[in-house]
């Protein structure tokens, strides 16, 4: 077990606990309070929140930390309930890293559904048929698993690499790399294996490709909403859903992709930003599953009003009792 800092140890755990609670509440909210106008889109929202919960659980099991060593970046598991099962923990850690790609893949599915709902309405009927659902699951799995292939091909440490950085970890953390699950990307040190610059560039292009796909569909959706002969109410609903999707894309880009991009490439400049990454960027990545359902709740009136009514019912008895008590104590 490696202690990094108080912020690194506790902030992600608090955020992960909140994420599980909020996403569970959101799933119940979507299932019970969705209006007919939302239609089967609610199943995509439920799926997305379920993936958020899965990513959060993996984050709790394998909390990541960042380190730099001779033009290489190292991401390792600092503390875990399965720490002593190194190989299994390392696989779960790699899966946790891939959840970012799965998230971007699912966001693209959301955009695709909205595009069909506006521009190709006849296709929405088939969207949730079993064979197409299985096809979508397969495509998202393939997209996200490219990160896993990159990790296992270029970033997976062998015993020789573990031995070469062992003294550094023993000196800094008093822990041998033989016990630590980690991945390493080498950018120029021949002693640490193959140069991983091409691999990390490929991971970046894969991530950016989904953002470009989303931007193209968002533009098509926006233009279609302007020209289609729809009622003002329907147009407003589609605009709100589009804005929500754009927010859902922007937030993970800022909270996950940008921190990952910084962590991946700053060692090329021979900088040591590991403290910044561990104290700021790691909590940012953990915060996304907390924020994502809140954005949807705030944007969509059905969910927003249901939450307001829920908390109003909870606070009204307290306020009534407090008022009664104050009236009684006057005499």
Image (tube, helix red, strand yellow):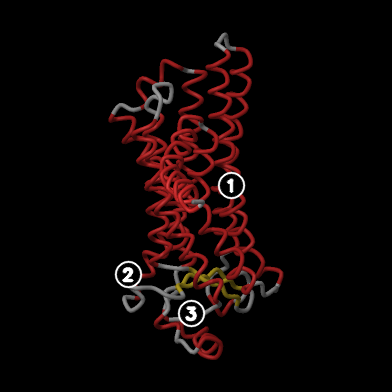
- Label 2 CA crowd tier, 10 Å (few <14, some 14–19, many 20+): few
Above/below status of 217 relative to 236:
below
User: Label 2's element?
Assistant: helix
Above/below status of 165 relative to 50:
below
- Residue 94 at x, y percent in the picture: 42, 63
Q: Observer-nearest residue: 311 or 24?
A: 311
- Residue 3 at x, y percent in the picture: 50, 80
Residue occupying image coordinates x 59% and y 32%? 243
Is 79 placed left or right of 212 in the picture?
Answer: left
Tell me the residue that label 2 is attached to.
88
Q: Which residue lies furthest to the left in this view?
A: 130
Above/below status of 136 relative to 67:
above
Q: Observer-nearest residue: 207 or 310?
A: 310
Of circles 1 and 2, which is in front?
A: 1
Q: Observer-nearest residue: 167 or 254?
A: 254
Residue occupying image coordinates x 58% and y 54%? 255
């Amino acid at each position: 077990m490696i202690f990094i800092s108080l912020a690194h140890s506790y902030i992600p755990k608090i955020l992960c606990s909140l994420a599980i609670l909020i996403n569970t509440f959101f799933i119940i909210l979507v299932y019970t309070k969705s209006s007919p106008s939302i239609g089967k889109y609610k199943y995509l929202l439920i799926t997305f929140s379920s993936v958020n919960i899965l990513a959060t659980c993996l984050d709790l099991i394998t909390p990541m930390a960042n380190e730099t060593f001779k033009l290489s970046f190292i991401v390792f598991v600092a503390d875990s309930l399965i720490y002593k099962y190194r190989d299994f923990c390392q696989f779960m850690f790699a899966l946790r890293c891939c959840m970012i790609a799965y998230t971007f893949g699912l966001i693209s599915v959301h955009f695709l559904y909205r595009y069909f709902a506006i521009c190709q309405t006849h296709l929405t009927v088939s969207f949730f048929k079993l064979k197409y659902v299985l096809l979508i699951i397969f495509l998202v799995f393939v997209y996200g698993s490219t990160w896993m292939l990159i990790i296992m091909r270029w970033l997976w440490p062998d015993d020789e690499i573990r031995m070469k950085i062992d003294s550094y970890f023993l000196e800094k953390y008093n822990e041998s790399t033989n016990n630590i699950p980690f991945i390493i990307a080498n950018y120029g040190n021949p002693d640490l294996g193959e140069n991983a610059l091409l691999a990390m560039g490929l991971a970046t292009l894969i991530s950016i490709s989904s953002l470009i796909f989303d931007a193209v569909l968002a533009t098509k959706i926006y233009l279609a909403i302007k020209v289609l002969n729809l009622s003002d109410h329907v147009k407003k609903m589609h605009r709100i859903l589009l804005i929500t999707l754009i927010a859902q894309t922007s937030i993970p880009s800022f909270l996950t992709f940008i921190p990952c991009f910084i962590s991946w490439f700053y060692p090329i400049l021979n900088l040591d930003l590991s403290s910044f990454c561990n104290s700021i960027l790691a909590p940012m990545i953990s915060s996304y599953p907390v924020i994502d359902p809140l954005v949807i709740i705030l944007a969509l009136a059905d969910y927003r009003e249901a939450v307001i009514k829920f908390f109003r019912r909870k606070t009204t008895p307290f306020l009534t009792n407090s008022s009664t008590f104050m009236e009684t104590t006057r005499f």
